[in-house]
């Protein structure tokens, strides 16, 4: 942890919040159905050794809002993938007129996050709920994948959601200026992108994880919001 206060304060975040109604699913998109989710769950469990603990690698909102039961968490490091604001949102934390951004695991670099150990029972139910949260449209922007992560207590094989470059929401590598502008202005019925960034930084810092990429962004976004005021 840096010991320095964040520039992106709750007051600045509140100043960009707007009350926005949910526009609902896009009429141009094709969405995953029950049979699709069931097949993905079976494939995923089929690639996991029987009797082995089921771990989930959380790098973004799954850290502070997992929405599934877990018994243990460990700080974990993943090589070959990095945290990146590479998902363009026209719903949730953005609109078609003023899109927002969300984090994804894109190729290259490394990422520190949290490994969550799920209970032994009801794995199909747990993964079904998780898949419905993370994947909605076809082709999905997220792909479930088993990843080898390192922890203080040794390596574990964890399920993570990595970027599908062919996914509908993937926007690739944007300039820092574009990322800052979209994070400073994006807002949807779930809240603002500034709030999402603040949640990511504070929850990582609380676990002793200092992400320099996110720390720099929060300062730049704070200055952008203040300048707009």
Image (cartoon, helix red, strand yellow):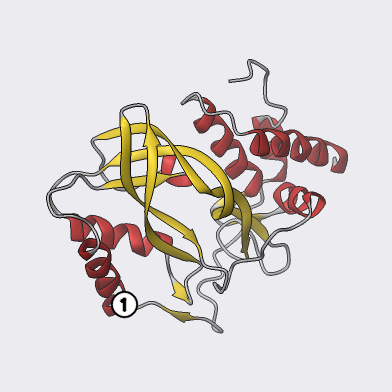
Q: In the image, residue 159 lies at what x, y percent? A: 34, 52
What number of labels is visible? 1
Of residues 113 and 122, the one nearer the viewer is 113
Is residue 178 at all visible to an observer of this figure?
yes
Q: Residue at x 42, y 44 (%)?
A: 58
79 shown above or below 138: above
Quadrant in the rendering for residue 187:
bottom right
Q: In the image, residue 143 lies at what x, y percent? A: 43, 65
Is residue 64 at all visible to an observer of this figure?
no
Of residues 187 and 139, the one nearer the viewer is 139
In which quadrant of the rendered image does the N terminus lie?
Answer: top right
Q: Which type of secondary structure does the marked residue at label 1 adopt? A: helix
Is 31 placed left or right of 15 in the picture?
Answer: left
Furthest toward the top, the residue is: 3
5 shown above or below 130: above
Is 209 placed left or right of 213 in the picture?
Answer: left
Of residues 95 and 211, the one nearer the viewer is 211
Q: Which residue is mark 1?
A: 36
Of residues 82 and 19, the one nearer the viewer is 82
Quadrant in the rendering for residue 65:
top left
Q: In the image, residue 68 lies at what x, y percent? A: 29, 47
76 shown above or below 152: below
Q: In the image, residue 86 lies at what x, y percent? A: 63, 58
Q: Residues within 10 Å of mark 1 (few under 14, many from 20)?
A: few
Is 126 placed left or right of 32 in the picture?
Answer: left
182 shown above or below 59: below
């Amino acid at each position: 942890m840096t010991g320095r206060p964040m520039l992106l304060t709750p007051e600045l975040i509140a100043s960009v919040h707007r009350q926005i109604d949910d526009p609902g699913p896009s009429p141009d998109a094709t969405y995953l159905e029950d049979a699709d989710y069931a097949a993905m769950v079976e494939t995923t469990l089929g690639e996991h050794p029987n009797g082995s603990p089921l771990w989930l690698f959380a790098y973004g909102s799954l850290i502070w809002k997992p929405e599934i039961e877990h018994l243990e968490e460990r700080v974990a490091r993943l090589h070959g993938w990095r945290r990146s604001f590479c998902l363009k949102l026209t719903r949730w934390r953005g609109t078609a007129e003023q899109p927002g951004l969300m984090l994804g695991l894109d190729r290259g670099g490394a990422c520190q996050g949290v490994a969550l150990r799920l209970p032994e029972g009801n794995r199909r139910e747990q993964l079904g709920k998780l898949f419905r949260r993370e994947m909605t449209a076809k082709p999905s922007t997220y792909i479930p994948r088993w990843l080898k992560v390192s922890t203080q207590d040794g390596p574990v094989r964890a399920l993570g959601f990595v970027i599908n470059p062919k996914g509908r929401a993937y926007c690739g590598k944007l300039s820092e200026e574009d990322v800052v502008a979209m994070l400073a202005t994006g807002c949807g019925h779930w809240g603002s992108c500034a709030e999402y960034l603040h949640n990511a930084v504070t929850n990582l810092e609380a676990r002793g994880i200092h992400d320099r990429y996110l720390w720099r962004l929060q300062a730049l976004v704070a200055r952008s919001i203040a300048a707009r005021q």
